[in-house]
């Protein structure tokens, strides 16, 4: 906003006070001068016990240099310079702020963390443009009701204070996306809290909560919920119906039961370590289609169900310090990067194998599957009910897990006996990974009415046949580590597909057909040779939240990609582009998208 709009009459200094007073040496004039140009002022770590008047009045006072020289060059026309939009006064010794705060109505960012504030001035209600407020690491016991007037606030950081309750009307902060209330003294979360419908990240860790409101499931956009280090004994079943949830932290509570997660198909990380959970059952696992990290350490588990094999995407599993005496051998078929088992009374795996690390344990478990599985040669009798090759098929998985599993056989084709073994059973998952197959088995189409999850990774596929495109209930498709360089246009018939993994193939561009599968939420296409993406078409993919383009051949990132505001995870490392630089990439997806948007030509 131009300062000239506030100037009265012809005198360019009319209506303004002389500046520079009340600043002493605590705020150098050069810093104020730079702030008038940039709209940003950083006074962190200056040992301030109060905010100097010249800071509050930076928008209304004449700068000191104007009193010395009334002939201004283009760069010195202070009345045209920028109002303060960003004020950082963190890491000082401030015990209070004055109502002069209202003199900075253009502020979008106010950072006052690490001070000694016990309250906030009521004038904070007048910062109508405020989008980010950081008051963490202070001594606040209550929040002023006026804070609920900040309707444009997107990020509110209140961690490490002394809050005992949440203000009435807090739910009016309708734009809030990121809220951190960790390390306070909260004992309850009001049900009205659930009206924060824009909230994406909520941190309630290290409080004294004994329960969560059932209404929490109204937060339809919540992706990250942290309730670590509380006193929770149960979780409301409604929480397990939150479709948007991706990260859930419940460590260090008093949980005795793990909730089922019937709707949490996007959940990537579940942390329930350091509780008192005694049982892990199939119902707890079967819906966790996207889970990457499962932390169950320091509980009272006695066993792990065979259904653990359903967690195809699982990369990290922590079972340390439980009461587990044996593991299902099927665990060896998971592609785990990390498996922690120490502190269990395991009798089936020798200590020396465990000490060698994850891959050795998995190899051992895989070897036991082969050793224990009946084969044609050692079957004493063969009844008319058993096909000669059926012994190679995991009948237990077909009947109890609804899974057709013929993985890690190094087979060049899937034998008919595998499909014959299905008989009248319903199959929802197919795992033919880690073989040598060069084309999609034609009999896959027999499963089109029921199958939702197909894993064909680690094979030698160079093309996708139409049989796969007919699996119209498919939601999850894993094609990583093949020889693919294109996808057929008919794949747009997969109208329920949510996740596709194309990593480690030979794609030189993002397949066009993917832009037309509007149900897609996750595209993983790292470690290919992708040289371009179409940001205009990608913007139309309103459900897309995760895009992994790491280790490709992108020479530039189109700025328009910043308009894909639904993206929550955008991974770009390992490409040859120069901008955005690594420092921006490290700040995460929101920072990358903002950076790109700022570079869209106007």
Image (cartoon, helix red, strand yellow):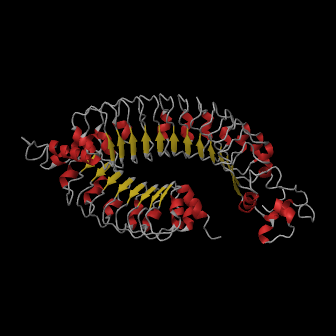
Measured along the vertical axis of the image, is residue 19 above or below residue 316?
Answer: below
Res 314 visible: no
Q: How many numbered marks have been drawn onto this rendered protein structure?
A: 0
Q: Quadrant of the N terminus?
A: bottom right
Percent of width and height locating residue 542: 53, 57
Q: Quadrant of the C terminus?
A: bottom right
- Taking 333 as reference, is 138 left or right? right
Percent of width and height locating residue 218: 56, 40
Query: Of all residues shown, which one is farthest toward the left?
Result: 380
Q: Nearer the viewer, residue 347 or 442?
A: 347
Percent of width and height locating residue 502: 37, 61
Residue drawn where x is 47% and y is 46% of the image: 246
Percent of width and height locating residue 467: 31, 61
Residue drawn where x is 45% and y is 47% of the image: 266
Residue drawn where x is 84% and y is 59% of the image: 62
- Taking 247 as reference, is 447 left or right? left
Measured along the vertical axis of the image, is residue 468 above or below residue 252?
Answer: below
Q: Nearer the viewer, residue 302 or 38?
A: 38
Res 347 visible: yes
């Amino acid at each position: 906003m131009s300062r000239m709009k506030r100037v009265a009459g012809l005198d360019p200094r009319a209506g303004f006070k002389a500046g520079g007073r009340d600043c002493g040496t605590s705020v150098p004039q050069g810093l104020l001068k730079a702030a008038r140009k940039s709209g940003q002022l950083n006074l962190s770590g200056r040992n301030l016990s109060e905010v100097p008047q010249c800071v509050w009045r930076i928008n209304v006072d004449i700068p000191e240099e104007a009193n010395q020289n009334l002939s201004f060059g283009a760069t010195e026309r202070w009345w045209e310079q920028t109002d303060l939009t960003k004020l950082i006064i963190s890491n000082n010794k401030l015990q209070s702020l004055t109502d002069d705060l209202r003199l900075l109505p253009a502020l979008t960012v106010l950072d006052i963390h690490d001070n000694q504030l016990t309250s906030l001035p009521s004038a904070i209600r007048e910062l109508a443009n405020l989008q980010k407020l950081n008051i963490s690491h202070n001594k606040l016991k209550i929040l002023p009701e006026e804070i609920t007037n900040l309707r444009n606030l997107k990020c509110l950081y209140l961690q490490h204070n002394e809050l005992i309750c949440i203000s009435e009307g807090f739910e009016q902060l309708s734009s809030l996306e990121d809220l951190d209330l960790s390390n306070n003294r909260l004992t309850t979360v009001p049900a009205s809290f659930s009206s924060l419908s824009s909230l994406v990240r909520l941190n309630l860790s290290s409080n004294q909560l004994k329960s969560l409101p059932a209404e929490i499931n109204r937060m339809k956009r919540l992706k990250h919920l942290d309730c670590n280090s509380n006193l929770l004994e149960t979780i409301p079943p409604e929480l397990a119906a939150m479709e948007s949830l991706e990260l859930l932290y419940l460590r260090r509570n008093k949980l005795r039961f793990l909730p089922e997660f019937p709707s949490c198909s996007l959940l990537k990380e579940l942390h329930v370590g350091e509780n008192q959970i005694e049982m892990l059952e199939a119902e707890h696992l079967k819906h966790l289609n996207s889970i990457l990290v499962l932390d169950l350490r320091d509980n009272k588990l006695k066993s792990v169900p065979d259904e653990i094999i359903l967690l195809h995407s699982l990369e990290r599993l922590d079972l340390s310090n439980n009461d587990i005496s044996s593991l299902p051998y099927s665990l060896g078929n998971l592609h785990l990067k990390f498996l922690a088992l120490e502190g269990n009374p395991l009798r089936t795996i020798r200590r020396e194998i465990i000490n060698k690390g994850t891959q050795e344990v998995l190899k051992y478990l895989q070897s036991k599957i082969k050793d224990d599985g009946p084969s044609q040669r050692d079957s004493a009798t063969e009844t008319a009910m058993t096909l000669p090759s059926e012994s190679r098929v995991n009948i237990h998985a077909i009947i109890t897990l609804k899974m057709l599993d013929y993985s890690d056989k190094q087979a060049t084709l899937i034998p008919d006996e595998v499909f014959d073994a299905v008989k009248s059973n319903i199959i929802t998952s197919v795992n033919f990974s880690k073989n040598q197959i060069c084309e999609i088995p034609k009999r896959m189409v027999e499963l089109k009415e029921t199958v939702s999850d197909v894993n064909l990774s680690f094979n030698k596929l160079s093309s996708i046949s139409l049989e796969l495109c007919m699996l119209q209930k498919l939601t999850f498709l894993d094609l990583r580590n093949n020889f693919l360089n294109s996808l057929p246009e008919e794949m747009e018939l997969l109208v329920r597909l949510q996740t596709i993994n194309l990593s480690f193939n030979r794609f030189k561009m993002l397949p066009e057909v993917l832009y037309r599968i509007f149900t897609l939420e996750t595209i993983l296409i790292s470690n290919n040779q992708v040289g371009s993406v179409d940001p205009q078409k990608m913007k139309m993919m309103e459900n897309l939240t995760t895009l992994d383009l790491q280790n490709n051949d992108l020479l530039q990132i189109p700025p328009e990609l910043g308009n894909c505001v639904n993206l929550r995870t955008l991974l770009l490392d390992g490409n040859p582009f120069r901008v955005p630089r690594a420092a921006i990439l490290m700040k995460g997806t929101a920072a990358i998208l903002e950076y790109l948007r700022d570079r869209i030509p106007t």
